[in-house]
Image (spheres, coloured by chain):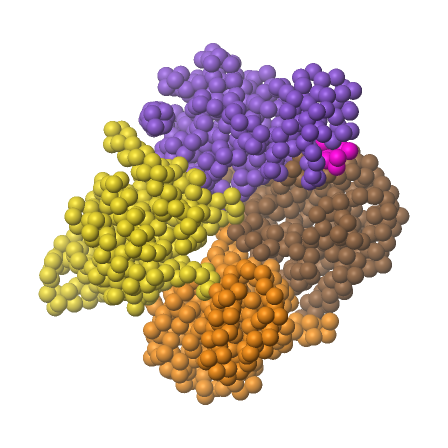
Chain colours: A purple, B yellow, C orange, D brown
Amino acid sequence: MILQLEPKLAAPSTDALLAAVKGIGYQPTHVTTQFGSYVVCVGKKDFDIRTLGSLAGVRDVHYVSDDYQLVSRKWKVERTYIDLGDGVKLGNGYFQIMAGPCSIESEKQVESVAKHLKSCGVRVMRGGVFKPRSSPYSFRGMGIEGLKMFAAICREYGIKIITEVMEPAQIEPMYEYIDVYQVGARNSQNFNLLDELGKVDKPVMIKRGISGTIEELLFAAEYVFSGGNERLLICERGIRTYERASRNTFDINAIPILRDKTHLPVIVDPSHAIGLREFVEPVALAGVIAGADGVIVEIHESPEDAASDGAQTLNYEESARLFRKVRAVLNVQENW
Amino acid sequence: MILQLEPKLAAPSTDALLAAVKGIGYQPTHVTTQFGSYVVCVGKKDFDIRTLGSLAGVRDVHYVSDDYQLVSRKWKVERTYIDLGDGVKLGNGYFQIMAGPCSIESEKQVESVAKHLKSCGVRVMRGGVFKPRSSPYSFRGMGIEGLKMFAAICREYGIKIITEVMEPAQIEPMYEYIDVYQVGARNSQNFNLLDELGKVDKPVMIKRGISGTIEELLFAAEYVFSGGNERLLICERGIRTYERASRNTFDINAIPILRDKTHLPVIVDPSHAIGLREFVEPVALAGVIAGADGVIVEIHESPEDAASDGAQTLNYEESARLFRKVRAVLNVQENW
Amino acid sequence: MILQLEPKLAAPSTDALLAAVKGIGYQPTHVTTQFGSYVVCVGKKDFDIRTLGSLAGVRDVHYVSDDYQLVSRKWKVERTYIDLGDGVKLGNGYFQIMAGPCSIESEKQVESVAKHLKSCGVRVMRGGVFKPRSSPYSFRGMGIEGLKMFAAICREYGIKIITEVMEPAQIEPMYEYIDVYQVGARNSQNFNLLDELGKVDKPVMIKRGISGTIEELLFAAEYVFSGGNERLLICERGIRTYERASRNTFDINAIPILRDKTHLPVIVDPSHAIGLREFVEPVALAGVIAGADGVIVEIHESPEDAASDGAQTLNYEESARLFRKVRAVLNVQENW
Amino acid sequence: MILQLEPKLAAPSTDALLAAVKGIGYQPTHVTTQFGSYVVCVGKKDFDIRTLGSLAGVRDVHYVSDDYQLVSRKWKVERTYIDLGDGVKLGNGYFQIMAGPCSIESEKQVESVAKHLKSCGVRVMRGGVFKPRSSPYSFRGMGIEGLKMFAAICREYGIKIITEVMEPAQIEPMYEYIDVYQVGARNSQNFNLLDELGKVDKPVMIKRGISGTIEELLFAAEYVFSGGNERLLICERGIRTYERASRNTFDINAIPILRDKTHLPVIVDPSHAIGLREFVEPVALAGVIAGADGVIVEIHESPEDAASDGAQTLNYEESARLFRKVRAVLNVQENW
């Protein structure tokens, strides 16, 4: 159950409210975000909704039957969108393409990608400076200095930045330079990181775990939201199955299911979802037509020379063709 | 390695050929289908291709690096299509929608579906008369008498029939009444059934196993082809994974991968791939845009009353809308 | 619900009984096996048990909450055992080792294995004459002639035979020569084969499907039992998962779970469960200590030269050591 | 490739060594642990081993064909054991039982468990004070204050403590109170946490990821080892599969495979591996007989009242019986 509170409710009224909720047997959590103030109540007790609805300070009472609450679509009819500024919006009808290299490698590389994105009308660039790697001996990214360079160039081109954060201690140093924090698949149940991202006022995109369930993904988002940050995106990036013909199995079913379960925007990452460059295009289009609010794609001027494994990375020509087709699909959808 | 033989090669020449191939260390299998005569050679020995190419009776020699041979796209550049007659073709640019109920229930039901399909311009009807059921106590279908009725009505409406065959003994009695034999997911490694279907001159659609790999699916098709029947379709219908929010996980990656690996037409079954009626449409469209040659969908006049579980079954209105959207997607693809 | 009937109940009384059960809303199936006569009732209606219990011909009424019925342990307290004759019993405290080659290859091979088994006190030999193979070009076994030879030698040595049956048409020709029909993992949902095996009076061992659930395995057994054959074994042989370090993942959890859910004997197949010869011993012992009623192991005089892939096959020395250790574990269990 | 260096090698010699290794095309990482100094070299170049072996400061050169290096058994013949002090050793023949509640709840609870463990001769207690929970609204543990209480009581009883660490910032505050840091399944690819645990001189037990591969588990251990901490345990706790009859699928195969691949001690966690209290005993015994170096089990005085879900928790009587049987199995193994 979610109680939406009046904005700027004084502390004594909030305390009275929490006591009242406890009184009827619920365990309440007080949540204050950028946009609102809520009391989330869990525990299953019957009660008379009029008891709560009439309390001072309560604007609205929503009964949510899911285990996750604030991210559920059961209480919030209108879909959420994220505004990155300068007209770059994502969700609730606003579609964004995000593209860029696996790893930030050099000024020259960032400049080249930024120029390509600009020429294709793409407004958000991805690129890792902290890289989660299975082996401790692999290249782990350029770090915060790489991020500063990345940010400086992107700002010149009017391009927003999404990049991965790997631990709480990185949140603050990254803050000034990024537009969206990305939580990677391996950290999708790093609850301490999620907690800390709930305290920041910048958007967060959470990737589904390597073998995370749809429900776990929604709970990861619930962590950030209940921590105080409503500006959330969730991302399907393929799951681990027995099939070896592709790197992961793109769970296309997750797109309509997630859109049914949550009001948050849903992004697809076709690059990791299949892991095979020549087939990124068809699975990206599949994600879009299934209802995604955005797509995030790995591109590189010459994938063969990428610092990280470029097996799933499109070159500029391939990506430009993909972007055109994505827009053609969006156009069909609009006219249905 | 595949040797394509001259048509109508006399038995002595064929024997000489087989001896020659054995002589260089290969294990040969002589295959005669509706359309051609081949010697498939397995076992890994180096040899001089000129030795074989110059033998009497050999029209062409193809080196195929895959373990499956005849179904591989490595030797057959042009995609296969299946001609069901009366202008109903499938594959190599011909797209077909197949739709119908899970189980054939009654004359009234078949008549109703046939009329609906005709009004939507759909030319192939699905419907089970032999039903594989987990529990021996469930309804197992109307059997051969149901099939006769099914066929009589469909012929009236100019509609082709695809239906499941469950054991070798059913092949012959079904022959007269069906247009495509379907091998279900649970029988995708029933090698004796596949062997027998290789001896028939009617198309066969093989569904991927419940947790079959893409390679196993291609080997199942290889069984039928090497048995003598080239008229094959393969079908992605979702795989078993840990995710419980959907009945199966639709492996959308399999569509472009299968089209890359085989020359056979690739069908998608969105109904079983997600198992949730309200989301059949988006995943069907995803399958189409990812490159499928056809789609097979469960529909029923009133899904709530279906003899079998109707959880994934569209009603007429939903299916008509889906068919329209499928055609809109095909139209976009043509103009790319 | 299961009604156990009086033995040799006359047809009119049975008919009256079936009508009575239908009358209260159940769907009844009359089952007659080697050992008893039952009416299995499915469909969920409340009723007064006294109505049925007092009907003429009913010996006992069992309410079984599982979806499968006759194989459930909820109605049959005492565990089932299978008697293969000559003192070879399996289940309910009788433990058997079954061992032999993947494929029957030659008289010499069978003779050698039989001698080895005899020297180790092993009473049941496995060995395939019909081999399910992913590729149609692989060796598919010596067939019925091989089976006759296999049987002739084993009888000489007082050794029982378990071997795989792949289609209904093979059941009758095999009958004379085998002691246990094995249903392979790929046929575990070949319902027509299971139906036919229900009509035979020889034991059947059903392997779990490649990615079959425990429930599906029990339903497969229910098919055979409800077809009329109570002499059943079920076998855990590893399942398909994402892990690639072993051929399958041995689901050791399944052993105690199966023993809890069914009264049928539970066998483990460590050879396929891990697929790596050097580790067959520890996983076999794990299966035994977890509660298995028997173990089935692949052995060969020289695994390197086996007709089939010998990657999981023990040689005589390794197998003799394994058999000793299995008996040591059984000994510990007895003294707990 | 691993170069073992002479102890206390001066910095200039080390630098010369690193330069020499780079010179032949390897990428070197200098690792200093509690017990030794190494240069790990990755990248695949041929070279003459005499070039390196003769360099000043090199004690030994090991070629390791695995991608992980320091944790591989290919260079370290003798198995590692961990010494927790007071005669509590683990690995290389020393077997330990670790047991305790899911969550630390109260002084009374800890006292009761400690007394029970002492009476059973168990020397290590588990118990969470930082709890990873899917839902942000669940009880997340007593925190550092709970740990202090936990430690005070255990010291009184001569019992060692293993407990989960969830983020780098917790490492230092926990240090004084724990004997083994546990990295949970959800953090098994939290590389920043693993890096930091490499800098600590206390043992670390890494659990396999929810759907982690065996290789990923070894790489997680490689992170900690290459960070400087050799005192490592690895733990199989079940993996996520499609099977729903148990909470996880215990990958028993992993025990012998891990023991073959790494010199580190291998622990099994049967409680999470099956998640069903009544079957914890058989799977625990299976793990032991398959070769585990230790077992970690959830117990509680009254599992029904546990603060966390007690579905897999043994009571004292059940655990005492399990401990007895574990020792009986160890006894059999010794006499093989």
- Residue at 42%, 31% (x, y): give it: A291
Give how far across and how far down residue C334 sits, in percent. Answer: 70, 75
Q: Quadrant of the C terminus of chain C?
A: bottom right
| Residue D77 seen in the figure | no
Is residue B107 among the parts visible in the rendering? yes
Q: In this view, does A64 lie above or below C247?
A: above
What residue is at 56 percent from the left and 17 percent from the top?
A177
Q: Position of residue D186 (x, y in %)?
A: 62, 41
Q: Give the range drawn in magenta.
A: A22-28
Q: Which residue is drawn at 10% across and 65% down?
A: B10
Direction from residue A148 to residue A51 in the image, left or right:
right
Q: Quadrant of residue C61?
A: bottom right
Q: Does the magenta stretch include residue A224?
A: no
On whether residue A25 falls in the magenta region, the answer is yes
Q: In screen coordinates, is B29 left or right of B15?
A: right
- Quarter location, residue D243: bottom right
